[in-house]
Image: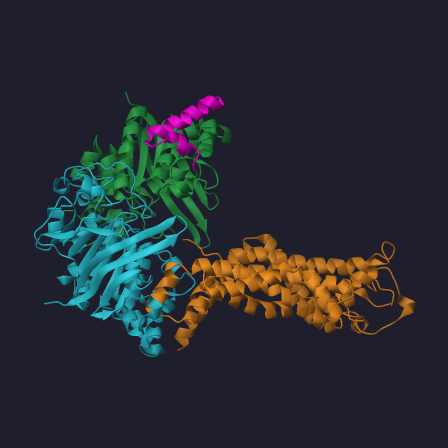
Amino acid sequence: MIMVHNTLLKRRLESLKKNWYKFSKNPVSVLGLFFVLAVSFVAIFAPYISPYPMHAGRYVNFVEASETPSLKHLCGTDVFGRDILSRIFFGFRYSLMMGAVVLSLVVVPGVVLGLVAGYYRGTWIDTVIMRVTDVFLAVPPLILALAICSVLTPSVFHAMMAVSLMWWPWYTRLVYGLSSSLRNEFFVQAAEVTGASRSHILFREILPNCVSSIFTKMSLDMGWVILIGSSLSFVGLGAQPPTPDLGTMVADGAKYLPDQWWIAIFPALAIMITVLGFNLIGDGFRDLFALEDI
Amino acid sequence: MTETLLSIENLHVQFKIYEGRLSVLNGIQMTVHTGERVGLVGEAGCGKTTSMKCVLKILPSPPGEITAGKILFHGRDILTMGTREMQHIRGSGISMIFQDPTAALNPVFTIGDQLTSVIKYGSRESLSKKEIYARAVGVLREVQLPDPERIFNNYPIQLSGGMRQRVSVAMALATEPELLIADEPTTSLDVTIQDQVLRLLNGLVEQHETSVIFITHSLGVVREMADWVYVMYAGNIIEGARKEELFANPLHPYTHGLMNALPKLTGGGIAEGIPGRIPEYINPPSGCRFHPRCPQAMKQCSESLPPVIHTSDDHDVACFQYGGEDYE
Amino acid sequence: MSSKLLGVDKLQKFFITSQGTVRAVDQVSFSIMEGETLGLVGESGSGKSTVAYTVVGLHSPTSGKITFEDRDISKSVSKRPKELKKSIQIVFQDPGTSLNSRRTIQQILELPLKVHHLGNSRDRKERVVELLERVELPADYMYKSPHSLGGGERQMVAIARALATGPKLIILDEPTSALDVSIQAKIINMLIKFQEEMNLSYLFITHDLSLMRNVATRVAIMYLGKICEVAETSEFFASPIHPYTKMLLSSIPVVSEEEEAMKPAKITSEGEIPSPVNVPPGCGFHTRCTVVAGGICSQEIPEMLEVEPGHFVRCHLYPSPLPVDSIAKE
């Protein structure tokens, strides 16, 4: 038994090493990975590594307000005297959470609908699914989010719901194209001839061949979702004060440009690094999932 | 008087991959004379297409790398040439036809567009628009395409496979090259169409006195097309002979095995193929790469690579059975 | 006396496309006995692959009947009983895409076993090892993915997959066309061995006539959706009758003088093969035929007639006193 596990482990390890080799062929992706890991680490351990964790909540200290960046406050303080660096650390939490929640809500239904529509291409199932998808795609995402958030009470939660609602069709579209062409490949037909069930064909034969595109899109989407979340906060429809959301911080700080530039610029840089990191990883994913020919 | 047009000398090519380096070409030698039709036969992966890509300098690099050797065209080493010089050679010096005509033709441009580009950029002299058009239609007519003026304005999708391959032949010959490299040009075609295209190629080649290197895995096709045949195995040229001589008297055990394994029209079942598999290029067998599968392997065969033995004017073979260490 | 395994009677399969109706298979009839190999030969547009896919159920017939062991199976695979899917299997032409590169060999070979509930997880693994040994591949290949295998090895896995459920009929659509000569030899000999051991029947499709000569018990040649000629193999090659058969045979490149001698006199073909969207009226071959019998060739479709015992031809040049509607009667 142990022998079996050894070889299984060895194979998994070899496969991991090889995957790293493929991913790291693109140094830019490695940089992206570094950014993402750094931001994630900071977000997870924010309460422990922020210099002033209480500043992330209700805190006021007008004595130390609007201080320029110094050794005491690396990114300076805002008009309420709160340490901006600490608020950025906590801000990462909201951004990452926004991205993670939206994607986890959106990917599964979007992909499943795309798989089914593609497999049944040409039938009424295809028509129904894709026309509904078209309707959702026709609405400009930010407008819909704005509309929903203004009707319901503005909050991070509602912002996430709004963004999720118009994000799923993109996955359906993506997977529909892949699924409808893969459907005619010989290996799918071989499975049909053998008598495999519909769900096996969709999830075990077709889906694994879509994974590369899905993951690449997910990594790029993280960036977009975070930006849209920040945009919603910027206009006041997402996180409400005193929540340290990066978008809100930029909005609040914008009034004080260019004199107290640090109040807006550092949060903006934080958004940029996060989004950039995810975008760069996307490229690496494509190489990672490519099959070697040799 | 035939002179040597192309001479490949001791060409070594490696490919770099995750697991290490693949030794794809292991020192090949080949000559093509003016007006000669040379067949290059070998199974998949033996390196025939790779070697021809080196001749045209279109080897993808990375991962490919020419680590040693020379390719002499009219006596000048192509491998040391600059881009400018090479562009002169491609087209009017050396031209190529690929296996899949659908992939070789750009689907969004008309045949005419593609043909005129080829003529414009590949010709030795500069030609006027009228001259280019005339030559394009002329060459389409030469490849026996019905109604060449209409075909000029067609898109590749409107033509059948056989017609597309004729267009590829037309494109390759439009620049009046001295050497034509045809990489499995008839493999994807139906048998009766293949017959037509082969006859066409033979006719044109004779007419223009072009030399041809004809790559194929089919011994039957090479018998119809070639004057001289080279047989390749795992990155080495293991036998080269005048066509009739090769079929009458195959010397190398691999060539023997290959001919035996062919299904015969006369029936009688198929002999067992050659035992074993094509070697891995990451760690190829030492010495003669065929020795692990060779029924006549000797001790020497695993120790050193057999040199090319000139058994007669019409027949070369790289096998220790015919000499080598203690030859003459 | 072997019994009839597969019967195909006046099968038609048409496809409606934007360019018109593709008459891919048009009134095709044949039968396959237990333990025999029927070879189907033809060029592009002949319909041979469509016949194969319709028999196996990937297409549903436009009209006509397919029977297997006397049961009517003229429907698509999703409507066929599950039992049947154990008995009829297919090996596809392209080893590159007939195996899912995202799955391991073990998963690929276990699928038919899982679908038909053949044993528990341990039994299945044993069977996979057994199947790999059968096709002379090392057992640890089961952990590999198809893309790390060569074309020949992938095809052997495809054959192992077809054998997994113990089928009676295997359809082989150009199984070795993409492979080298020495691998082809190995695979063909393996297929012949399996046929003897397991009393399998094969519907063997190829355009390589030299290969067909050594594999098939009977040969049928197709052109633009119709069968032109059927005969026992040695008879087919020794005395071909239909002009298309002779044209095809005379065009194949061979390697020896004896084979050259076997070929009929050279008939050079001119012109392209018509598209099955635009089948010429009357005998589909008349536009390229060098021995046209007369006006009738462009007007009437010739009947399939038994010209010699067991040798059927569809050509106006060969009327016969034994008109036969369908070879299925044999």
Report which quarter residue C278 is drawn in.
top left
Farthest right residue?
A63
Q: Which chain is cyan?
A: C
Q: Is residue A37 magenta?
A: no
Q: Quarter holding the N terminus of chain A? A: bottom left
Quarter occupied by residue A240? bottom right
Res. A141 image quadrant: bottom right
Residue B50 appears left or right of C321: right
The colour scheme is by chain
Please identify which colour was used for chain B in the image.
green
Q: In the rendered image, is residue B278 in sight?
A: no
Frontmost residue, A240 versus C84: C84
Q: Main SS type for the magenta part?
A: helix
**Measured from the top left, where is residue C197 in percent x and y?**
17, 67
Residue C140 locus on image (x, y percent): 34, 66
At a point 71% along the width and 61% down the height, the residue shown is A143
Q: Nearer the viewer, residue C71 or C198?
A: C71
Question: Which x, y percent locates residue A206?
Answer: 45, 64
- The answer to whether residue B148 is magenta is yes
Q: Provide the letter of the chain coloured orange.
A: A
Q: Residue at x 80, y 65 (%)?
A: A84
What's the magenta region? B125-154
